Image (spheres, rainbow, N blue to C red):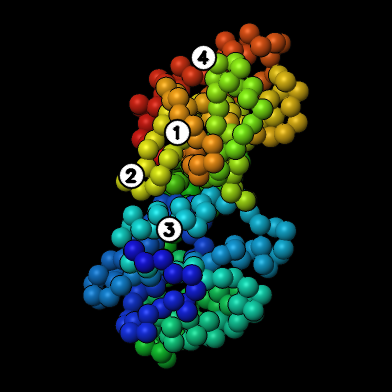
Amino acid sequence: MERWRGVERVPGKWGRCVVTIGVFDGVHLGHQQLIRRAVDKAQELGVPSVVLTFDPHPIEVIRPGSHPPMLTGQRYKADLVQALGVDVFCVLPFTLDFMRRQPSEFVHSVLVEKLHASAVVVGENFRYGAGGEGTVAAMTADGQRWGFSVEGFPMQGAGDMRWSSTYVRSCVSAGDVTSAQAALGREHRIHGIVVRGDQRGRELGYPTANLEPLPWSAVPSDGIYAGRLVRGSGRKAELLPAAISIGTNPTFAGDERRIEAFVLDFAGDLYGEHVGLSFTARLRDTLRFDGVEPLKAQMALDVERTRSLLPLHPSG
């Protein structure tokens, strides 16, 4: 899969294609259905499929300071999209100038002049252009003028639920990683750099990898989780079982929120690595213990429960 930053990267001899457009944060099951529909359409027409997304999140530009927690960074999002059979992942910089474009201008400058779209597949409630004035009906009318078809795809969910990034964020924020997994079709994962902590875990016999997450990451609520530390990406990723702690470490009167993973049966050095943490199940709340020994006893129980849970669940 090709990865472009901006439509300026479109090759000079680029032909027609099928485009799907959206933020696609989380690439949840609804997004997956939509993207697969675009891929199928592209195969029917014998042209490439293009996922068009944005960076930063449009809300941050429209209302500065209101950036939502992000379920997927751009690199991980691209990996997930690639697994769906997409040919091109194109990220459009979302700027004030871009935000102010009229819907018809966006259609002509991006979809017609640059991408030469033969078909566009979007969610049935898709909005675009200045003030969100562009609708599927408006794009359909422009498509008739410029020679491409438009399909508004229903973002269905399970039962009465509609899959949405907002719903998944609410699950993650509440620590309900099981419901988040049901909507994502995989375990929720955050990414970041392993940094040095205060070494207290090592002193307790449970050395941890301290994760500094990517900005705006959707971090689950404070608690202890069973999950995996992920090294690498794609099919070559190494998934290491881990007991994960999120919180301020109240037993030691901590005031800094940390994300720490004790990787089971691992003795290597992870400092400085870019890794992921996927969340399989919430084990318990973060608690304050009356001393080190009760804490160590509970940590031993957390590790054994993690060990017993992970074989029963799919990997992140």
Residue 301, numbered label: 4
User: What residue appears at the point 52 percent right and 63 percent down from the top-left corner?
Assistant: 23
Q: Secondary structure at mark 1?
A: strand
Q: Nearer the viewer, mark 3 or mark 2?
A: 2
**Which residue, given by chain and number where applicable, does mark 2 sit on?**
236
For the residues labelled 3 and 1, the Cα–Cα distance comes to 21 Å
x and y, in percent, of residue 162 in the image: 48, 53
Q: Secondary structure at mark 2?
A: helix
x and y, in percent, of residue 299 in the image: 56, 17
User: What residue appears at the point 43 percent right and 58 percent down from the top-left corner?
Assistant: 78
User: What residue appears at the point 49 percent right and 74 percent down from the top-left corner?
Assistant: 6
For the residues labelled 4 and 1, the Cα–Cα distance comes to 17 Å
Q: If you read the primary sequence from the N terminus, does the residue marked by circle 1 or circle 2 appear first?
A: 1
**Which residue, given by chain and number where applicable, does mark 3 sit on?**
78
Q: If you read the primary sequence from the N terminus, does the residue marked by circle 3 or circle 1 appear first?
A: 3
Q: If you read the primary sequence from the N terminus, does the residue marked by circle 4 or circle 1 appear first?
A: 1
Residue 171, numbered label: none
Q: Secondary structure at mark 3?
A: helix
Quadrant for the C terminus, please: top left
The amino acid on which the numbered mark 1 sits, given as a three-letter code, is: Arg
For the residues labelled 3 and 2, the Cα–Cα distance comes to 16 Å
